[in-house]
């Protein structure tokens, strides 16, 4: 009996090993050749009304926070223009902009607005999405409005009691995401508390974070706007409640643009132009929403 | 047929070898880059700090050791007394109820322990000790103590049952009470089995990740009973998904350290089990 179980287990393990390898191979083969079935390609080119199939490669480089948005754009663009290969390298917004200005990539990706000196050097911004981060508290909490400055002080440990911002006399439990999280990066960057946050607890997913804030009356946390539900309260920031509308009109402050950057005067290849047009078109709005951001076209 | 069994037996060895080699190969580069002393004894873990990243895992090592020790301090006395009760005192009927329940405790998935800890224990700690958040080393210790109970109970019960009846009868015949007999004759005779139970508990506690990920808070502070802490296991589990570069390599190095810990515990366990057989 024991031997049989042993045998069964090892077969299962061996099989899982084989399937794991197999899976890896097929997926790499798919992305290398980029030969998605021509039937689906014909279908989608028909529906979008593209006149001809373009072939080529688009190299993009920049913000790691845009990885999700880029992944979804790459994937859906493949169905529209199967002949175009889009490459994405996540090296950070700054180096993405530098690389597009010196011509080593076609499109730079930046998860912040361009600086004046970057625009002077000829960088042109095409906003593809807006990323809003909501600051959430427990429904029992009476604090409903905070300024960005207060939020920064709370997360860097200068304000430690809710009574200092008009709430009950209770110590604040500052909840954050784990190191490496895109939401954490976005929040710390916008609020201006990069590397100075003093967290009480860290959570490794948005769901955990929202659940933990919902279960602790002393808690404050942050989550992508799309992940906020009725179990927590998203506080107003400088008097503005977070919503898709306030993110889009720019009145909600804890937000940043996802920008595709090109160089002024530099001629774009046909493939690059096609990808840029696609990424800024209204048809990608739902895909961008699925990646957790707000499309300016929505 | 025999060849088939041979191959199957061999598969286990291959897996262990592959995992060992893989861990060493992927764990060493980061240690080399960070420096062994800085890695093992650094007190700051700020893996994504852009200006001044730090990869010291001493807080995690100490948390894992304290957490495991705490779980043993709470779990072993309870487990040992339960084992004495089950093997010596309880009537067969009562033992017949308790034993399956203990086995059931062993079968509960760790995420369920974590869930109960998160929903019940964590708010309780927050309200009782007036801390801003209840996630703490204490919560992790209590959850781990309950989780290691079943293995401690069943292994020490087996060891206690294996003590020859004649020893106990001789002790009783000399006028010792039943309690004296259990603690001064049966328990010493079963000591290597009980030690094996403790080591098994240590192994289970130090390797657990899911349950304590949900109750420990996961900030790499130096351990304190009521502060949020990060274990070696949860350090890997919480950061791996979005990690990159040196951060990712350092997580593999944590895995290597954890692997060495578990190896030592296994060697210890084998020593005790061997001694048990020789007795």
Image (cartoon, rainbow, N blue to C red):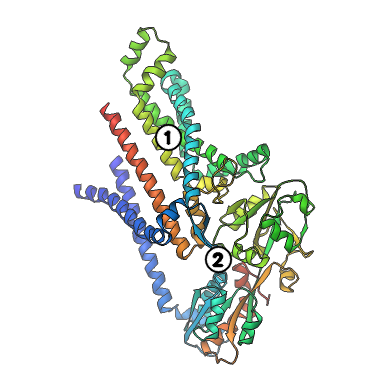
Relative to A202, residue A23 above or below: below
Q: Is residue A186 visible?
A: yes
Relative to B155, residue B84 above or below: above
Question: Image quarter for residue A273?
Answer: bottom right
Relative to B193, residue B172 above or below: above
Q: Which label was assigned to residue A82?
A: none
Which of the two residues, A110 or A67, is positioned nearer the viewer here?
A: A110
Q: Nearer the viewer, mark 2 or mark 1?
A: 2
Q: Mark 2 Cα within 10 Å, few/some/many (few <14, many 20+)?
A: few
Q: Check chain identity for marks 2 and 1: say if they share one.
A: yes
Quadrant of the image containing the C terminus of chain B? top left
Residue B174: x, y in percent?
35, 7
Q: In the image, what residue occupies the spot 62% across and 60% down?
A: A196
Which of the two residues, B62 or B248, is positioned nearer the viewer here?
A: B62
Instruction: Give the residue at the far left of this rendering.
Output: B2
Q: Secondary structure at mark 2?
A: loop
Q: Which residue is mark 2?
A: B51
Residue A257: x, y in percent?
65, 74
In the displayed structure, does residue A209 sit left or right of residue B108? Answer: right
In the displayed structure, does residue A284 sit left or right of residue B241? Answer: right
Q: In the image, what residue occupies the spot 35% across and 29% down?
A: B193
Question: Image quarter for residue B165?
Answer: top left
In the displayed structure, does residue B71 sit left or right of residue A246? Answer: left
Which of the two residues, A112 or A295, is positioned nearer the viewer here?
A: A112
Q: Which residue is mark 1?
A: B151
Q: CA distance from mark 2 to mark 1?
A: 46 Å
The subunit letter for the residue under badge 1 reads B
Q: Secondary structure at mark 1?
A: helix
Say which label, 2 or 1, has the lower sequence index. Answer: 2
Residue A185: x, y in percent?
59, 65
Residue B143: x, y in percent?
53, 39
The subunit letter for the residue under badge 2 reads B
């Amino acid at each position: 009996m024991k031997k049989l179980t042993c045998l069964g287990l090892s077969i299962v393990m061996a099989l899982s090993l084989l399937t794991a390898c197999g899976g890896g191979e097929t997926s790499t083969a798919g992305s290398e050749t980029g030969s998605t079935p021509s039937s689906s390609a014909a279908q989608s080119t028909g529906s979008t009304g593209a006149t001809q199939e373009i072939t080529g490669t688009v190299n993009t480089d920049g913000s790691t926070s845009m990885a999700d948005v880029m992944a979804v754009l790459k994937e859906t663009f493949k169905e529209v223009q199967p002949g175009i290969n889009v490459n994405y390298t996540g090296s950070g917004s700054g180096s993405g902009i530098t690389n597009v200005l010196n011509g080593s990539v076609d499109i730079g990706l930046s998860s912040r607005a361009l600086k004046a000196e970057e625009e002077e050097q000829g960088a042109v911004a095409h906003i593809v999405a807006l990323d809003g981060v909501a600051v959430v508290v427990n429904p029992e909490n009476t604090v409903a409005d905070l300024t960005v400055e207060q939020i920064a002080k709370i997360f860097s440990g200068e304000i430690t009691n809710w009574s200092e911002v008009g709430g009950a006399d209770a110590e604040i439990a500052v909840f954050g995401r784990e190191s490496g999280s895109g939401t954490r990066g976005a929040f710390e960057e916008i609020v201006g508390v990069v590397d100075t946050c003093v967290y009480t607890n860290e959570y490794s997913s948005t769901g955990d974070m929202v659940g933990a804030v919902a279960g602790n009356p002393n808690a404050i946390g942050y989550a992508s706007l799309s992940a906020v539900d009725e179990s927590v309260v998203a506080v107003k920031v400088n008097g503005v409640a977070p919503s898709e509308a306030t993110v889009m009109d720019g009145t909600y402050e804890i937000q940043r643009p996802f920008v595709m950057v090109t160089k002024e005067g530099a001629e774009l290849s046909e493939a690059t132009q096609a990808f840029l047009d696609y990424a800024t078109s209204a048809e990608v709005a739902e895909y961008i929403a699925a990646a957790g951001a707000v499309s300016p076209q929505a | 047929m025999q060849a088939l069994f041979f191959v199957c037996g061999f598969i286990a060895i291959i897996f262990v070898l592959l995992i060992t080699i893989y861990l060493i190969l992927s764990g060493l580069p980061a240690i080399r880059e960070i420096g062994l002393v800085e890695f093992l004894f650094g007190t700051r873990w700020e893996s994504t700090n852009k200006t001044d990243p730090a990869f010291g895992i001493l807080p995690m090592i100490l948390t894992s050791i304290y957490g495991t020790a705490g779980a043993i301090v709470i779990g072993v006395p309870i487990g040992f007394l339960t084992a004495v009760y089950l093997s010596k005192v309880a009537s067969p009927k009562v033992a017949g109820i308790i034993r399956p329940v203990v086995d059931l405790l062993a079968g509960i998935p760790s995420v369920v322990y974590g869930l109960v800890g998160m929903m019940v224990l964590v708010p309780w700690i927050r309200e009782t000790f007036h801390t801003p958040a209840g996630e703490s080393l204490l919560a992790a210790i209590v959850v781990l103590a309950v989780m290691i109970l079943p293995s401690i109970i069943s292994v020490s019960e087996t060891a206690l049952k294996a003590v020859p009846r004649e020893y106990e009868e001789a002790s009783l015949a000399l006028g010792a009470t039943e309690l004296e007999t259990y603690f001064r004759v049966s328990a010493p005779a079963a000591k290597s089995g009980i030690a094996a139970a403790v080591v098994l508990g240590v192994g289970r506690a130090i390797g657990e990740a899911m349950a304590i990920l949900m109750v420990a808070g996961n900030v790499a502070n130096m351990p304190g009973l009521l502060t949020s802490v990060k274990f070696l296991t949860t350090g890997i589990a919480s950061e791996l998904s979005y990690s990159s570069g040196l951060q990712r390599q350092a997580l593999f190095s944590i895995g290597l350290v954890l692997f060495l810990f578990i190896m030592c515990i296994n060697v210890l366990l084998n020593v005790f089990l061997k001694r048990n057989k020789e007795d």
